[in-house]
Image (cartoon, rainbow, N blue to C red):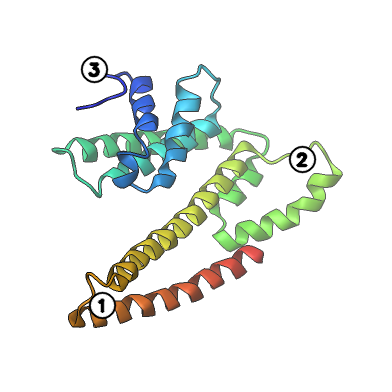
């Protein structure tokens, strides 16, 4: 009813509306941290900046994140699943085409090794590469290396975001139960359950912190 820009929208208009109404509207529907994905799309799709193949892959992944997040609210009469399927199809097609180009590149072995390694093996590979990268400017990682790193960063962000959302839910539950106007005897078990959950979360967060330190 009250919009920054009236429809019909272009993509640029839509992203501007998201940013304008994010805190008051969309941040209550999906995780507020997704604003970074909206800003990423706006910066690279609506400003005329040149986009390389690595950035295209990232933009498609960010688009999938946004669509997936809004699916928790509604399927929007089937439009959202269809949009997600099309974006995912484009992403898979792009990866296949990009993979064919990578295979013809002179650094084929390096890129293929990085893409098939497990998460821990990627870290080991990076550590092994550091001395060589420092000693020779010619041996620079292929762009696919940075895409693999970006994927890893998104996975870490997703874990931390999940912890944060859970802490929020438990905290809301606890503070509601501590409100003298709402506390009842029947709420005791729920309060204890929430408090116990927070204790487990503290241990989980501590494990994540140790993992980041490693």
Q: Residue 28 at what x, y percent from top left?
A: 31, 46
Q: Residues within 10 Å of mark 3 (few under 14, many from 20)?
A: few
> Element type at marker 1?
helix
Residue 190 is tagged as 1
> Is 117 or 207 nearer to us in this picture?
207
> Is 88 or 81 nearer to us in this picture?
81
Which residue is the site of mark 3? 8
Q: How many marks?
A: 3
Residue pictured at 38% horizontal, 21% vertical:
12
Q: Residue 151 at what x, y percent from top left?
A: 51, 48
Residue 112 is tagged as none
User: How many angstroms separate mark 1 from mark 2 (CA)?
Assistant: 58 Å
Residue 49 placement, left or right of 34: right
User: How many angstroms separate mark 3 from mark 1 (CA)?
Assistant: 47 Å
Q: Answer with the quarter of the image where residue 175 lies.
A: bottom left
> Element type at marker 2?
loop
Residue 139 is tagged as 2
Q: Residue 189 at what x, y percent from top left?
A: 25, 82
> Is 85 or 64 nearer to us in this picture?
64
């Amino acid at each position: 009813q009250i919009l920054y820009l009236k429809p019909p929208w272009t993509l640029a208009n839509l992203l501007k509306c998201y940013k304008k109404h994010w805190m008051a509207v969309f941040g209550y529907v999906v995780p507020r941290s997704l604003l970074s994905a909206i800003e990423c799309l706006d910066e690279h799709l609506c400003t005329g900046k040149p986009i390389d193949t690595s950035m295209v892959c990232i933009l498609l992944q960010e688009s999938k994140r946004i669509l997936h997040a809004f699916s928790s609210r509604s399927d929007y009469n089937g439009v959202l699943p269809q949009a997600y399927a099309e974006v995912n199809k484009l992403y898979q097609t792009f990866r296949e085409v990009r993979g064919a180009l990578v295979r013809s590149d002179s650094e084929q072995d390096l890129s293929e090794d990085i893409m098939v390694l497990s998460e821990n093996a990627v870290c080991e590979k990076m550590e092994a590469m550091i001395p060589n990268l420092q000693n020779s400017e010619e041996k620079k990682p292929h762009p696919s290396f940075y895409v693999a790193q970006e994927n890893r960063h998104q996975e870490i962000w997703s874990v931390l975001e999940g912890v944060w959302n859970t802490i929020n839910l438990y905290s809301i539950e606890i503070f509601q139960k501590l409100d003298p106007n709402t506390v009842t005897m029947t709420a005791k078990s729920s309060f204890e359950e929430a408090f116990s959950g927070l204790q487990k979360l503290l241990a989980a967060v501590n494990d994540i912190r140790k993992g980041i330190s490693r």
